[in-house]
Image (cartoon, helix red, strand yellow):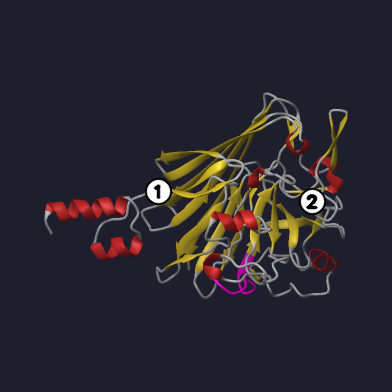
C-alpha cells in the first residue's frame, strides 16, 4: 500500500467511517468526536448531535437538546456492534412525542417531590405537579427540555462533551440561579463517565441524573437480563409513588438483588411494592463506606454476552423496568417499544428528600459545589 492510500485510510478512520469499514481497510481506529446538525427547536433554535467514538469502535451520541444520550453502540461477545439504548432517530421524535425521558439529562430534581411542595430556610416553595399528584424530573420544562451549550473535550482517558446551562432564579419554581456543567466522557475502557457539577446563588435543592433506557440484547424485552444491585435496603413507596420514609431491608423480598437474578424472575409476584410500582420502580439504598466511586449494579444479558456495570458516588439508584411503555411508541428504525423494552439505572439522591429529614440532604448553598460522578462501563462475558 502506498503512503498516499495509507494516509487516506487513517484520515477516514479519524473522521468516523465506522469500525467495520476501518477494520476492512486495515486502518487503526482512533478516538474522535463528530459533530452534525440534528434539527432545531422553535424556541431555542439549532440542535447539534455529537458522536463520541473510541479506539474500540464504541460510539455514543449525545445531543444538545436535553443533554440526551441518543445512542450507545457497543459490541457483543462476537464483536458485533449493536444499539443498547431506547430513543428516536430524529429530534422530532423527542419533541412531538410524550417521551418517557429517553436518555435525558434530568434536573433540577430527579425523581419525585411529594405534591410539588418543600420548605427551605423558613420559606415554602411550590413546584409544578406533573405526575401522579407530585413533581417529577424537574417539572414541565426541566433540564431535559432546554438546549445546552456544548464544547468538545479530549482527556488522557478519552474524548468527551461538556454541556453547560444556567437555570435562572425561579425557573420551574426553584430558588437560586443554578449554574450547571455536565461532562460526558467516553473512555478507552468502554466507559461512559458522567460528571455533574453545579453552584447556586441562593440556597436551593438539586439532584441530577441521566435517564437512559438500556436493552443489552438490542431488542425484545429485558426480563432475561440478570442484575445484581449492591444494596441491602430500599425505600418503599406509597400508592402515589412517594417514599414512605422507611429504609426497608431487601432480604426476603422481591427487591433482593444482592445476588444476580433475572429481572423477570419475580416481577409478577403479588407483592405490594411491585403492584404499586407496576413492576420495579424503586430507589435502592446503595451499600457504601464513603462518598468515593463504588459499584452500584451489574447487569448481564446472556444471549449477547454484553455486561453493564454502574459505579457512582451517589447514595441511591432508581431501578425502573419500563413499566409504562405500552407499545404505542415507535422508536429507532420504527421499532415499537412494548412494556419492559428497557430498564433504567438512575443514580441519585433519594426521591422526596426535601420532605424526608432522615434521607441524605439535597440542599445546596452559595459557596458550595454540587459534584457527583457516575460511570456506565460496558464489557462482554
Callout 2: helix, strand or loop?
loop
Q: Residue, x 87% and y 58% (percent of image)?
A: 238
Q: Which of these two is toward me, 5 or 145?
A: 145
Q: Residues within 10 Å of mark 2 (few under 14, many from 20)?
A: some
Q: Is residue 118 left or right of residue 297?
A: right
Between disc 1 and disc 2, whose residue precedes? 1
Dominant secondary structure, magenta: loop
Mark drawn on residue 152:
none
Q: Quadrant of residue 358?
A: top right
Residue 357 visible to an observer of this rendering:
no
Callout 1: helix, strand or loop?
strand
Q: Residues within 10 Å of mark 1 (few under 14, many from 20)?
A: some
* Residue 191 % position (x, y): 49, 52
Q: Which residue corresponds to mark 1? A: 34
Q: Which of these two is toward me, 176 or 363?
A: 176
* Residue 126 % position (x, y): 84, 39
Task: Tell me if residue 225 is in the magenta stretch.
Answer: yes
Task: Tell me if residue 298 is in the magenta stretch.
Answer: no
Q: Is residue 200 left or right of residue 82?
A: right
Q: What is the span of residues highlighted in magenta in the rendered image?
A: 218-227
The quarter of the rendered structure image containing the N terminus is bottom left
Mark 1 to mark 2: distance in Å?
36 Å
* Residue 27 % position (x, y): 25, 57
Q: Quadrant of residue 16?
A: bottom left
Mark drawn on residue 130:
2
Amino acid at each position: 500500500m502506498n503512503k498516499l492510500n495509507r494516509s487516506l485510510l487513517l484520515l477516514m478512520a479519524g473522521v468516523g467511517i465506522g469500525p467495520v469499514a476501518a477494520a476492512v481497510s486495515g486502518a487503526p481506529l482512533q478516538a474522535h468526536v463528530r459533530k452534525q446538525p440534528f434539527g432545531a427547536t422553535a424556541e431555542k433554535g439549532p440542535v447539534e448531535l455529537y458522536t463520541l467514538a473510541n479506539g474500540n469502535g464504541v460510539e455514543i451520541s449525545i445531543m444538545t437538546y436535553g443533554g440526551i444520550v441518543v445512542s450507545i453502540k457497543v459490541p457483543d461477545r462476537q464483536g458485533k456492534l449493536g444499539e443498547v439504548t431506547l430513543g428516536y432517530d430524529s429530534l422530532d421524535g423527542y419533541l412531538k412525542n410524550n417521551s418517557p425521558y429517553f436518555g435525558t439529562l434530568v434536573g433540577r430534581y430527579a425523581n419525585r417531590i411529594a405534591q410539588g411542595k418543600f420548605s427551605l430556610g423558613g420559606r415554602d416553595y411550590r413546584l409544578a405537579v406533573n405526575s401522579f399528584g407530585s413533581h417529577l424530573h424537574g417539572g414541565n420544562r426541566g433540564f431535559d427540555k432546554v438546549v445546552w451549550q456544548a464544547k468538545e473535550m479530549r482527556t488522557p482517558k478519552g474524548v468527551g462533551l461538556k454541556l453547560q446551562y444556567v437555570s435562572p432564579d425561579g425557573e420551574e419554581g426553584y430558588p437560586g440561579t443554578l449554574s450547571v456543567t455536565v461532562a460526558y466522557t467516553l473512555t478507552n475502557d468502554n466507559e461512559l463517565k458522567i460528571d455533574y457539577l453545579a453552584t447556586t446563588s441562593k440556597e436551593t435543592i438539586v439532584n441530577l441524573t441521566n435517564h437512559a433506557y438500556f436493552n443489552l440484547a438490542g431488542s425484545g424485552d429485558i426480563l432475561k437480563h440478570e442484575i445484581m444491585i449492591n444494596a441491602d435496603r430500599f425505600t418503599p413507596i406509597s400508592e402515589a409513588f412517594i417514599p414512605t420514609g422507611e429504609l426497608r431491608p431487601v432480604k426476603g423480598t422481591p427487591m433482593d438483588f444482592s445476588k444476580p437474578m433475572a429481572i423477570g424472575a419475580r416481577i409478577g409476584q403479588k407483592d405490594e411494592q411491585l403492584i404499586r410500582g407496576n413492576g420495579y420502580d424503586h430507589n435502592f439504598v446503595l451499600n457504601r463506606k464513603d462518598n468515593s466511586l463504588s459499584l452500584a449494579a451489574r447487569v448481564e444479558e446472556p444471549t449477547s454476552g454484553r455486561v453493564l456495570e454502574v459505579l457512582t458516588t451517589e447514595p441511591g439508584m432508581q431501578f425502573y423496568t419500563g413499566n409504562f411503555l405500552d407499545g404505542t411508541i415507535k422508536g429507532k428504525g420504527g421499532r415499537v417499544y412494548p412494556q419492559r423494552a428497557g430498564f433504567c439505572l438512575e443514580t441519585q439522591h433519594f426521591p422526596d428528600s426535601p420532605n424526608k429529614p432522615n434521607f441524605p440532604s439535597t440542599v445546596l448553598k452559595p459557596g458550595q459545589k454540587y459534584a457527583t460522578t457516575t460511570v456506565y462501563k460496558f464489557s462482554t462475558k
